[in-house]
Amino acid sequence: MRTGSTVILGQNVAARRINPAPSAKGPGADQPFEPGTRLDRYVVLERLGGGGMGQVYRARDTELDREVALKVLARPYCFQPEALNRFRAEAQAQARLRSPHVVTLYSMLELPFAAMLVLEYLEGETLESRLRTGGPLPPHEAIAVFEQALLGLTHVHEMGVIHRDLKPSNLFLTSTSEVKIMDFSVAKLTVRDAYPPRTMVGTLLYISPEQISGREIDLRSDIYALGVSLYEAVTGRLPFERGTDYGLMHAHVQEQPPRPRELVPSLPAGFDRVIMKAIEKEPGHRYRSAEEFRAALLKLDAHAGSLSASLPANAYGPVPPPRSSRRSGRRVLASFGLDLGLIAAICGVLYALGLYPGQSAPVEPPAAAVTSAPRPAKTSRPIRPKNPPASRPSDSRDPYNTLRQAWGE
């Protein structure tokens, strides 16, 4: 299916068909620059990609000794005032932006043989490439990617810029796990627009209903496009897939897409609510800002974290032995039993020695009769002295008095 590239349809479509724009494949075609070509102070290292409107190169800035990206306008368009003015408008829009989540524009150059933007060079891949090779993103990864994209979009809107062409191919995932918005070729400044009124600008797979209808657009058109991109990122397909441009436009304006969980039942329930709100037909029913969209995503992430705590214990491995409170109860009982055992042992020793409350020390027989005298019966009780020793007066209030007497104190 085509329609994956940016389209520009105005009221004079018929005139454009009669007098088409110069093609890069016709006479004077724009030939890619070879590695080693010098463009002002920049030396081309390799071609990164491009299309009919121009090429993108990796190059070296010979004065600052750093790598940059060069977006070079196709040569036939350099001699068309309308195309050149739009290229300048792109530079003016991007020059306003200073965010870690937006590709940085360093400068714009207009040379006798080329016009080009000098941009920050990034290592990594686009979200489109990631989805094509790796399939749909897990929910937590999708939240991490789009949370950053919405941070960048918040800054873009705060600076008075509407992107108008947000899609996975314009979200760059760097090798350091940063997400950056790029390609402001059809961006609109809120104070002016390089395109005539009622011009439909964007990519049909992601374009908002108001852009198709030719109505006035605002930042909520970007929210719709980013919502469609999030839908694709978590389900692996677009909300509307039709065989013709008209079918796509009609679907965006009139039809309701399947809810994400109908395609991927394992998605958390909140994804349906968040995505479907972002791609509402009427702008007034969508999130009012990129920051509000981002806050809804972060709530999803926090809720997913609380849900993970209630997963089955064997979700990520064997179930560990239960830590029941009965174990702690058994420990208390065992400790209490040990104490009772110690007390019983002490009492047994005292009883064997005849040292128990209410009994005086036993009367030992004379030393000479130790071997011949019969052992007294166990039932015999020693005779308590009638008069306690005068050296320690009896004190009935002392509970240890009997013990002291027994030990001969």
Image: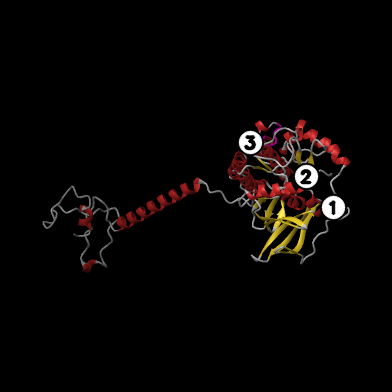
Mark 1 secondary-structure assignment: loop
Q: In front of the other: label 2 or label 3?
A: 2
Would you place residue 337 above or below residue 239 in this image? below
Can you give x and y, in whole percent of width and height, for residue 137 in the image? 70, 48
For mark 3, what is the residue? 287
State the CA–CA distance, disc 1 to disc 3.
41 Å
| Res. 371 image quadrant | bottom left
Given residues 372 and 7, the one toward you in this image is 7
* Image quadrant where one finds the C terminus: bottom left
For mark 2, what is the residue? 6
Residue 24 badge: 1
Mark 3 secondary-structure assignment: loop
Are the two marked residues, 1 and 3, in contact with CB atoms closer than 8 angstroms?
A: no
For residue 53, say whether it is visible: no
Range of magenta residues? 277-281
Would you place residue 126 above or below residue 192 in this image? below
Residue 246 vs residue 230: left or right? Answer: right
Mark 2 secondary-structure assignment: loop
Q: Amino acid at mark 2?
A: Thr
Q: In front of the other: label 1 or label 3?
A: 1
Residue 152 vs residue 347: left or right? Answer: right
Based on the picture, tell me whether residue 260 belongs to the magenta stretch: no
For residue 153, say whether it is visible: yes
Tell me which residue sits at (38%, 51%) in the image: 340
State the CA–CA distance, disc 2 to disc 3.
24 Å
Given residues 89 and 58, the one toward you in this image is 89
Q: Main secondary structure of the magenta part?
A: loop
Crowd tier of the residue under label 3, counting other residues whose Cα lies within 10 Å: few below 14, some 14–19, many 20 or above: many
Are the two marked residues, 2 and 3, in contact with CB atoms closer than 8 angstroms?
A: no
State the CA–CA distance, disc 2 to disc 1.
17 Å
Q: Amino acid at mark 3?
A: Tyr
Crowd tier of the residue under label 2, counting other residues whose Cα lies within 10 Å: few below 14, some 14–19, many 20 or above: some
